Image (cartoon, grey):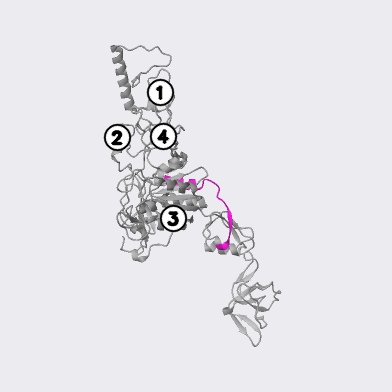
Amino acid sequence: MTGSDGPHREPGSDFRPAGPASERAREEEERAVEQALALVGGSDRTAGSGRSGGRPRRSQGSGGHQDSGGHRDSRDHQDSRDHRGSRGHQSPRDHRDPRGENPNPGPSSDPHARPSSAPHVRRSSDSASYDSYDGRDTDPRDGRTTASATTTGTTATAPAPGSEQPPLSDGASPDDPAKPRPTPPPPSWNRARAIAARAGRGGPPATIRLPLDRALGHVLAEALGALTDLPSFDTSAMDGWAVAGPGPWAFEAGAGLLAGRGPAAALPDGTAVRIATGARVPPDTTAVIRSEHAQVDEARGLLHARRSVVTGQDIRPRGQECRSGEQLVPAGTVVTPAVLGLAAAAGYDALPVVPRPRVDVLVLGDELLNAGLPHDGLIRDALGPMLGPWLRALGAEVSGPRRLGDDAGALRSALTSSDADLIVTTGGTAAGPVDHVHPVLEALGAELLVDGVAVRPGHPMLLARLSPDGPYLVGLPGNPLAAVSGLLTLAEPLLAGIAGRPAQDPYRALVHAEVHGHPHDTRLVPVVHRPGRAGGRDHVAPLHYNGPAMLRGIAAADGLAVVEPGGVRSGTEVEILDLPWAPATPWTEGCFT
């Protein structure tokens, strides 16, 4: 094959120039080969099956997809509705010829491709275990699958002896060595959540002991076993009279038995003694008669029962609630006020809990104001005030938001100096001139676990791990409702895993309205719960003002409906994501629906 440097000469061969006839035959043969490659998608040059000129295929999750110039083909370009060239909304660069090829080949057909002179982002291949994905790459040009190799970085393969195929840079197309292969589509919403949840459960949770007054909201690291019988002695369940044997019963005047006192003497048959709720019941007591069910004859010193007396009535026997060593609540239980009370009753002064995940919030963007009215192209920062309380409601310990502007150096410094379990960034996840999240992650050698999700709003969200033992990073889009989508899709399941919280069982509810869907992606739509009328079922109503940049709808919502691609009709059940606070108040009726 003739290239820019002259004819290709095989090692050890004696090259002779071809004559006109042989040259024509050779050109015809090359055209036939090219036509065959066009029909099969160039698979004999890309399958990496040991054929001459073959090269190993890159794993879907290893190192990204680079062209021969080291440019990663970007998956994070936003259109005017806060999403990157999606499967349902392609940008001009995504229109390819019938073979799936870009009609405008060149060193890089992606005008937003980022040079990767720094170490490239490592793309995780762990996601294969989250659903039926079997670890094989699908060739988008011919629909076939070939086994993945674990090659990372940009590589080139030398031609096999006797082959006219020149070396191809890893990631290059056979028809155009400079053009990268198409990037695989982003994961589904369900798959992205599963990846985040598994990442959070990646290691055994740490355990600390906290006094009861500081344990609220934490998750139990160990099962809570009773340290004593509950109750630890027979006690009276009511104010009244402790009696022994059949009545009437003789009694003596006096205060009787009070709670908190030591054991009393055994009670002889035919006698009674006043007793307070919680007081120890004397030995040989038959029952406790409530004060309102007793008739006292003060003159004769006798007690009569107004109702029949049953042995053991209104006595809480020792161990009625639990016996010492019995499990009270399992590990993974969130410590509520009721759990605190039970733990105290069972003899605990401190509890073994999982420490709250520590979260740093980094707000990016030079256009954001901290106070006052928007002016001169500047807008108020809505995410800084919102994310801290939201993350705390998810059980995290959150530092105050840091506003870094659009400064790549400041972002890198903040990431490398953080000691948090999770770093949340806002904005900068696309590929604009001041979107620095991807380049900084590349420079740090981070591993991308999720890079874009098939969900609206919030398509350009991401999840990365800065180092094997370092913090995670959730990159949220800059639009407020898109950021909420990222919180619920990636941050919530990740934090639940780190904190040891059990996964919540999904539930479904009827939706009373038609909800339009995206052609290919899941939609998250703010909804509010409504009680059924005239015996009808409870349902949810979708709220207006649900655009990616809007917060008016989510502010009135108590949940988000998970709308599958294509939308749903009124009366259909949809999965609901609860928001971590009280339901919407009545004033929302009719105002947003």
Disc 3 residue crowd, few under 14, some 14–19, many 20+, Cα 10 Å: some
Would you say 4 lies left or right of 229 here? left
Would you say 345 lies left or right of 426 here? right
In primary-sequence order, the first of circles 1 and 2 is 1
Residue 556: which quarter of the image?
bottom left
In primary-sequence order, the first of circles 4 and 2 is 2
- For mark 2, what is the residue? 96
- For mark 3, what is the residue? 401
In primary-sequence order, the first of circles 1 and 3 is 1
Q: Nearer the viewer, residue 5 or 267?
A: 5
Q: Can residue 30 be seen?
A: yes
- For mark 1, what is the residue? 53
Q: Nearer the viewer, residue 199 or 153?
A: 153
The residue range painted magenta reads 191-213
- For mark 4, what is the residue? 137
Residue 257: which quarter of the image?
bottom right
Disc nearest the viewer among 4 and 1: 1
Q: Amino acid at mark 4?
A: Asp
Disc nearest the viewer among 4 and 2: 2
Residue 74 position in % (x across, y down): 36, 39
Residue drawn at (31%, 43%) of the image: 88
- Report how far apart the C-alphas of labels 1 and 3 lie in the structure: 53 Å
- Report how far apart the C-alphas of labels 4 and 1 lie in the structure: 20 Å
Disc nearest the viewer among 1 and 3: 3
Looking at the rendering, in which quadrant would you find the N terminus?
top left
Q: Amino acid at mark 1?
A: Gly
Residue 58 position in % (x across, y down): 43, 33
Q: Can residue 537 be seen?
A: no
In primary-sequence order, the first of circles 4 and 1 is 1
Disc 2 residue crowd, few under 14, some 14–19, many 20+, Cα 10 Å: few
Label 4 close to label 2 by CB (< 8 Å) = no
